[in-house]
Amino acid sequence: MEKAPLPNKVREFSKWYDEVLSKAELIDIRYGVKGFVVYRPNAMIIVKKIYDLFEDELKKRGHKQMLLPLVIPMSNLRKEAEHVKGFENQVFIIERAGGDVLEEKLVLRPTSETAIYPMMSLWIKSYKDLPMKLFQSVAVYRHETKATRPLLRGREFLWIETHDAFATSEEAEAQIKEDLEIAKKVYDELGLAFIVVEREEFDRFPGAERSFAYDALMPNGEVLQIATTHYLGQKFSKPFEVMFMDERGVNRYPYTTCFGIGISRTLAAIIITHGDDYGLVLPFGMAIYDIVIVPILYKGKEKEVIKKARRIEEIVRNAGYSVKLDDGEETPGEKFYKWEMLGVPVRIEIGSREVSEGTVTVFRRDLRKREKKKDGELVEYLGYLKSDMIRVLRGRSWNTLKERLVKVNSREELLEEAGKGKIILANFCGKKECADGIKAETRGYEVRGRRIDEPVEPWGPCVWCGEGAKRVVVLAKAF
Amino acid sequence: MEKAPLPNKVREFSKWYDEVLSKAELIDIRYGVKGFVVYRPNAMIIVKKIYDLFEDELKKRGHKQMLLPLVIPMSNLRKEAEHVKGFENQVFIIERAGGDVLEEKLVLRPTSETAIYPMMSLWIKSYKDLPMKLFQSVAVYRHETKATRPLLRGREFLWIETHDAFATSEEAEAQIKEDLEIAKKVYDELGLAFIVVEREEFDRFPGAERSFAYDALMPNGEVLQIATTHYLGQKFSKPFEVMFMDERGVNRYPYTTCFGIGISRTLAAIIITHGDDYGLVLPFGMAIYDIVIVPILYKGKEKEVIKKARRIEEIVRNAGYSVKLDDGEETPGEKFYKWEMLGVPVRIEIGSREVSEGTVTVFRRDLRKREKKKDGELVEYLGYLKSDMIRVLRGRSWNTLKERLVKVNSREELLEEAGKGKIILANFCGKKECADGIKAETRGYEVRGRRIDEPVEPWGPCVWCGEGAKRVVVLAKAF
């Protein structure tokens, strides 16, 4: 069998990841500022697609796009006590511009609660202004002290943040469900499996009353948080004096939520989840082309082959696919290597045999399988591949996740399954000491929280202390 | 005649502008950091549209989208001597993050030449890598010392910047023409008139060998630079050591260009050029809805009217328009006011007369005219309005510009026409002293440069010193 061009994704994940980012020309890490990377065109095609999918879905559900300034006055950041504690040690600070010292220090947005709430206090006056559902698509800036990894843990990362305000806590709670539906819809289209947990009290977003996290799976069994939803109650509306007059003329504080969708991390999850040892694997619409045509030229037959390749190119383009006829000087093997690395979903090979037979050889990237089709069957087959490939990718992703999930009944089982890199469901009492104990003895398994996308009732005592369990939680290592 | 809700756009432009930004809920200036504004949803719809049009056009012509970090190391900024002189007094500086002092000072990108060229030196190795045509859609940051105006002169503004590298100066020069074609195509779709000038030597972008500016017209006769193209020659490729090996194996420096498209200023130009004393005027596809339907309810006829309004809503939506049936509790007059302020292109009014006649009353926002149409004629008429309204807006914009343009033959004529707020075409010797003289005596008329979209040959001596003229230049006040 041919040798794969990349290190093995599961066994040598770090090397695989660095090489695929570089060889598929996705991310350049040589910019020279720690935690900041360059998104190359192949990455930006995927980034745009992810943004489009989420933005469309948010708009369909009543969100409107806005754009807040990058900079936040330090005094704003300090208005919500827990929030500032969570972020003040990781904000980038601007004190000077040109020759001038600024009157007030500014920070680069680490998240935008303290930018939007002063504006909401101006925009919201009456119950008629509610619900107010806004979002922005921006980069945020956090001076992470931990080691940085491109797309996974950076100091500049792309995301979407919603900021929603409601008259009642019930409506705000309902928004949490809607956020989950939005994520489900889009991650399905991207073929990504994920689990959703409600965080424990000791592990919430600074200032939040309830926090929810969306975790995707890494090849080593660790989980990667790709999105979060927070129920903020009135914790932000009060200090920022956001008020509305209700139907009876009474001034009240709205209940608010926010939803942070990690676009950089979703990009990473797509690369990592679908990719293989030959490079990127992408569904239709996300690679540089949907289809490449590679003519296989034999002496004396070049003209016919090229003629057919052009005809097929025309047919495929007219069917609505983005297509590239690669008639460059490289060998077919070099071309196969290149387009597979870039994750182009379909390759059509045309040689003199295909000319004489009236066929085309179609290679699908997800399964790395060739199939011969009559010319007349091609367009219908491409339609099938378009839906089948995303189905295959999605199925593979969910199967991998399900195979990793295991229920444990005791400390011993927990330690054994943790040793195998499983994602563990266990009964839990809710105490931080137990979470700390588990983390220490499993070398890093964290209580991710209570699963809410497929809730499970406790079936026994806390797996760690043996006292009464309040809920079933997911235990996993965080990437 | 009804009283217009806004001050007169021409006579009280500043008041008009501030009020339309606020009443059409476009921009909120109350964020609290000088030069930084909030883009509200109605503005973001237009911003997205402008970005989409330019990005599509750039991609069609071989540009690829990338994304560079926000921050640039101070040492990069200092690599091109003229460039740093032009920007160092207006960059925002980051020296600290969290508790740490950064090893190297970072600046927020004022433009990204000094971010992209170090990367190009890694990406470009051979003539096969050229041309390299890249762009990014980002905000840039300049601590302007002049008075700020929302969208027009801010410290954070949205733009697109291309960075293109070519093997030969001829190809780079050809890119300047292509940039002009891109601008022409998109500004035509937006209905905006503009003139393109090549800047005088004393007025170039810091580091550029040739600079070109795209100017739109303000109601007071001043011009607003909405885009620029720069021919950088080898001025950046040399200090950043960007090199390629040519076909003969010789290492050479590529020739580069950049194209900066002011998205914030284009938004301002759309608001200002098309808007009137009743609010925004927008072509189809750029307002919150293409069409609003306002039922005019008389007692006893409500049901029939609402029924017809719903039927028309269905027809219009099926024809592909975004439509809102406004059956809220406000009076028809209040609804008219609101949707006109937001620039909704078409309003359909339906009362009991329209029900009995089988007609609809169609109001077009650009001309503020009503026309009655048979129900069966509606869809065809909307198709006509869609193309006619942008044609009307574009024609109005170009006529206004042409009416302002005047040729002068002497100092006296120049001073007289300058007093009338005209945009002036005059013969010019090329000397900075003459430009300074003109500026001083006309209270601010600048030599904008030689018009290149419709070149004119000199027909006499320099309008100021009377010596030989090298070219015809545009003289105007800059907004």
Image (cartoon, coloured by chain):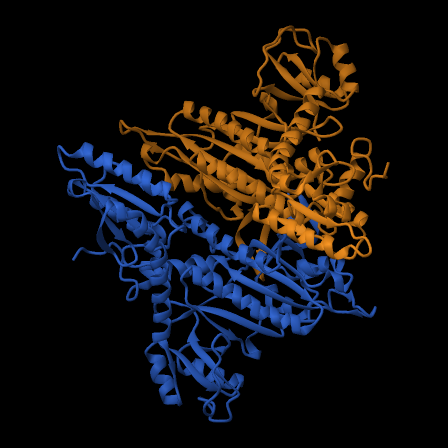
Chain colours: A orange, B blue
Q: Quadrant of residue A280?
A: top right
Q: Is residue B445 visible?
A: no
Question: Who's the residue at 57% across and 21% down the image?
Answer: A453
- Residue B50 drawn at (x, y percent): 47, 55
- Residue B109 drawn at (x, y percent): 60, 57
Q: Is residue B125 left or right of residue B333?
A: right
- Residue B353 drawn at (x, y percent): 15, 43
Residue B463 versus residue A219: which sits nearer the camera?
A219
Asked if A383 appears above or below B379 in the picture, the reply is above
Task: Work out which quarter of the rendered image holds the N terminus of chain A and state it.
Answer: top right
Q: Is residue B321 left or right of residue B79?
A: left
Residue B378 versus residue B366: which sits nearer the camera?
B378
Task: Work out which quarter of the rendered image holds the C terminus of chain A and state it.
Answer: top right
Q: Is residue B193 visible?
A: yes
Residue A128 versus residue A215: which sits nearer the camera?
A215
Question: Who's the residue at 55% across and 45% down the image?
Answer: A138
